[in-house]
Amino acid sequence: MKWKLGMLLGLLLLLGGCRQKPLLEKVQVAPTTITPNADGKTDLARFSFLLNRGASLSITLTDAQGQSYVFRPPVRLAPNEDRPYQVYFGGVVDGYTRAGESYPYAVRRRMLPDGVYTWWLTAQAEGPLVVFSGTLTLVDADTRLPGITDLWLSRRTFSPNQDGLADRVRVKFRLQKDVADLRVYLAGADGVTYALTENRQQTPVAPNEAGWHTFDYDSNSRPPPDGRYPLLIAARDKMGQSVVASTTLTITNAGLPQAYIVNRRVRYSQKSLVLSDTLCFTLTVQNDSDTYLRTTGPWPGTTYRSDQNFDDLGWPEDRGAFRVGMDFDTSLQSYPFRWGLGHPGVELVEMGGYWYLPPQARAAITGCVQVVDVPVRDPLYYWMGLIHEGMSTPPTNLRVDPRFITIWKP
């Protein structure tokens, strides 16, 4: 009989030892009063808890009127039997607006106003909900939103292809308080973002400081494909309140221009000449990009005098235009003799009143210079270049195929 009693007691002890732990335990929130104003003193309350099995967990708060606010939406967490989870709360919950409020931006995260709130920590695994609750008081909370107002765009359609026409868009707005983070970007459908940079010359305040801000988007890097894009301005203050202002921007004729003189070879008409003779050249330009290259005259076949330049012929430098240029050792001007990348209506197509070399197209270009004065140095080098006027020209397109030329007096 005694041995039966011993077996029964052992079985009870074994069953007691195998009793399942509670899903959620050791829930604590401290301190119970916070002052979330980014002064570094009692800005945060810490939620800590043990989760003994994997579960979906959420944290919400309810005000005195019964309005519920989401701090942490339901998210699946793994068990953490050894070290408690710790979540810090600074008074900021998912965005909300009160009756009668209207803003020119979306409120993504927002500070709760001062008051006493009931917090709810809810966990659910396979069984019923497990809920813990308590109270938390907010005092002296910084509820001023990092608002974005007076949004302005210099243009709504943007063609970032470095042709000097509508290559840049300027975004201007007023930031209503100092923030911890400020971003302006285009959002692509593929999840890729394209950041705009702040124009410090046009912004009278420091980065992230309240006041007027100006951001630019230019075409100095590879632009996104053509299309209509959301343009987003996102601001987040020190306590985590965040807002997003949005508009749209249309991109058309986008592309990164790339071109070169084929084989870096130039065919010159002669190696020496008599004063008043002409030095002519022939070369081929390849548009190696998927965008159109804008160009301007004078057109191939034009003959310059050596005492002239492109301004004298009525074709001044044009920012964004591509032209072939000739230069020489003693020139006082960079590439004073220039020619367009083809003939209008032949190699070139018209777009918006301007002439363009189409994507992946080639053009054979010829031109001449009549040497009417003896240069300071003789003999001397002449060479060619493919100039992207007013923009950055790759070194490979400069000083192409120099030719040593002797000039004789008659």
Image (tube, rainbow, N blue to C red):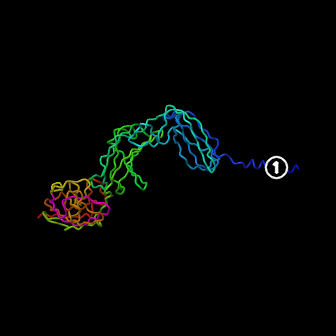
What's under tag 1, amino acid-wise?
Answer: Leu
400 displayed left or right of 102 = left
The residue positioned farthest toward the left in the image shown: 410
* Residue 266 included in the magenta stretch of the image: no
Identity of the residue drawn at 30% across and 62% down = 259
The boundaries of the magenta stretch are 280-306
Q: Position of residue 125 (x, y in %)?
A: 62, 49
Do we see residue 355 in this rendering?
Answer: yes
Identity of the residue drawn at 61% across and 46% down = 129
Q: Secondary structure at mark 1?
A: helix
1 displayed left or right of 152 = right
Q: Position of residue 391 (x, y in %)?
A: 28, 53
The residue positioned farthest toward the top in the image shown: 140
Residue carrying label 1: 8
Q: Position of residue 253 (x, y in %)?
A: 30, 57
127 displayed left or right of 159 = right
* Residue 291 included in the magenta stretch of the image: yes
Foreground: 184 or 130?
130
Residue 150: name its quadrant: top left
Identity of the residue drawn at 66% across and 45% down = 22
Q: How packed is label 1: few (under 14 Cα within 10 Å), some, or many (20 or more)?
A: few
* Quadrant of the frame with the C terminus: bottom left
Q: Position of residue 376 (x, y in %)?
A: 18, 57
Do we see residue 381 in this rendering?
Answer: no
* Vertical comparison of 401 with 179: above or below: below
